[in-house]
Image (spheres, grey):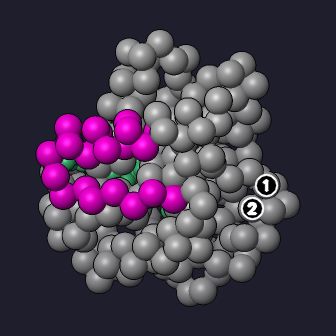
Amino acid sequence: MFITFEGIDGSGKSTQARLLAEALTGLGRDVLRTREPGGSPGAEEIRALVLQGDPDRWSAKTEILLFTAARRDHLERTIEPALAAGKVVVCDRFADSTRMYQGLSRGDLRALVDDLHRLMIGREPDLTFLIDIDPAVGLSRAKGRQGHEERFEDMGLAMQARMRDGFLTLAQEFSNRFKVIEGDRAPEAVAAEVLALTLAALQARA
Ligand code: ADP
Ligand code: TYD
């Protein structure tokens, strides 16, 4: 089973991916936790290219190609082998992030993102948790971190709000696999809901 976490910066995706992976491991499942951009040695190199440096470093279209190239490598080298080995794959961000960030933030490029996804990736998660949160809360949490990966982090409140709305619309578009989770709660409360939904989905597939 292929599970992804999506949401705006600071919504708690990484925290929840870790807690879910730990809980499933504790229940005896074989779990691989991974993230995008990155998740394989080649894709981690591309991560540095897309997240570091000047915000204008790449054109909108070049950026889509770089994220998709990273995803292709991650899929081939990390995700597909783990799924073939029967593992539960828990991934922090995947193609829905490209649909939002590259598809919405610099003009309407969603059709291009979708075309490239169909050609080069062609795989959707089985289950996607959208950790939904007020953009002001997400931004204040994300600002607590300091680092070099800030190309997207200065998007500001208005853009974060657009991304949040976009993710909620995407959850309706792919309602078969999305679960929208209220993220402004204690991490343990969010994790308990995520685990219960995951176990129900695993049981339904057994
Ligand atoms: P994301 O991966 O979505 O950017 P993180 O999981 O890295 O989010 O969380 C961002 C920051 O907020 C971290 O410092 C983390 O410890 C904190 N955090 C995560 N979940 C919660 C929560 N439910 N309540 C309060 N703080 C949280
Ligand atoms: P991430 O490391 O998940 O950051 P955060 O924990 O703050 O959410 O992702 C880094 C940035 O990369 C994030 O601002 C969103 C952006 N991103 C895209 O623009 N497109 C993509 O396809 C992916 C996977 C991430």
Pick the quarter of the image with the C terminus: top right
**Looking at the picture, which amino acid does disc 2 mark?**
His
Residue 82's spot in the image, x, y percent? Answer: 67, 25
Above or below: residue 37 compared with residue 183: above
Q: Are marks 2 and 1 in contact (CB under 8 Å)?
A: yes
Stretch of the chain drawn in magenta: 178-198
Q: Residue at x 36, y 47 (%)?
A: 13
Asked if 187 appears above or below 22 in the picture, the reply is below
Q: Name the residue that disc number 2 marks.
A: 117
x then y, percent, for residue 4: 52, 46
Q: Nearer the viewer, residue 139 or 181?
A: 181
What residue sits right under mark 1 in the picture? 122
The N terminus is located in which quarter?
Answer: top right
Q: Is residue 87 left or right of residue 15?
A: right
Mark 1, secondary structure of its residue: loop
* Residue 186 at x, y percent in the picture: 14, 45
Marks 2 and 1, the one that precedes in the sequence: 2
- Disc 2 to disc 1, how far (Cα)? 6 Å
Return the residue nearer the eye: 56 or 116. 116
The residue lying at 60 percent from left, 61 percent from top is 176
Name the quadrant containing residue 141: bottom left
Q: Position of residue 48 (x, y in %)?
A: 51, 46
Position of residue 74 in the picture relative to residue 48 (left or right): right
Tag 2 secondary structure: helix
* Quarter of the figure with residue 143: bottom left
